[in-house]
Image (cartoon, coloured by chain):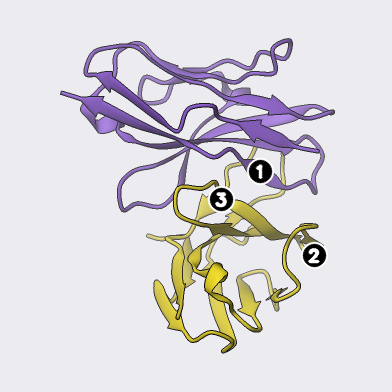
Amino acid sequence: DAMVIQNPRYQVTQFGKPVTLSCSQTLNHNVMYWYQQKSSQAPKLLFHYYDKDFNNEADTPDNFQSRRPNTSFCFLDIRSPGLGDTAMYLCAARTGGMNTEAFFGQGTRLTVV
Amino acid sequence: AQRVTQPEKLLSVFKGAPVELKCNYSYSGSPELFWYVQYSRQRLQLLLRHISRESIKGFTADLNKGETSFHLKKPFAQEEDSAMYYCALRGFSGNTPLVFGKGTRLSVIA
């Protein structure tokens, strides 16, 4: 059974129209990550949460926001998507111990038109 | 700053040949190192971690702190090993990010 679930799998949005991607986990893990992965590139970390502590990577655009209302759910909000935001968005969860495995969702493929 | 370098975008080997996927890292403290794999149309998943010192699917990786490397090796490649492989690093303390290299696509030719 999938432990990290991302919805939707595919999302098409118009340039400038706000969009929200969601992630849920059944693992009760306290660490969650959002990554952006463009074609043939490495997953690029956007944010991560350690419990309620929110960490924003320095080069994450201001256009990108995140919410984590409880342990299980995490959202990625893109306020005004640009064409360059077309990418696969990956969510992952990990327990906060040392050398622990990050469990990934299937990803949401976002296309901005 | 954390950095992971995978110098090869694509590595093609024949079935039965040895495989080595290179990974070098840069981190000032004690790192935790991982290899993740993504098979076609599947999610990214952990292959192995340096602390475990185990062989998974015939793959091993040794952390060499002197050379700051964590190369992934397998003595005899199989067709089912064809996938995208990512080396990843995390700092030893609790609240540090998990950072990925750009990945190497391994293609095993029959």
Label 3 element class: loop
Foreground of the two, A98 or A15? A15
Q: Quadrant of residue A68?
A: bottom right
Q: Is residue B38 visible?
A: yes
Residue with the most extreme bottom position? A17
Q: Callout 2: 10 Å neighbours few (<14), some, many (20+)?
A: some
| Residue under the image location 64 percent in, 30 percent down | B33
Alpha carbons under labels 1 and 3: distance apart: 8 Å
Counting residues from the N terminus, which is met first, the one under dot 3 or under dot 2? Answer: 3
Q: Which residue is mark 3?
A: A43
Residue A36 in the image, given as x and y percentages of width and height: 57, 59
The x and y percentages for residue A73 are 61, 73
Closer to us: mark 1 or mark 2? 1
Looking at numbered disc 1 in the image, what kind of residue is underneath it? Val
Position of residue B34 in the picture relative to residue A110 (left or right): right
Q: Secondary structure at mark 2?
A: strand
- From this viewpoint, is residue A31 visible? no
- Chain (purple): B
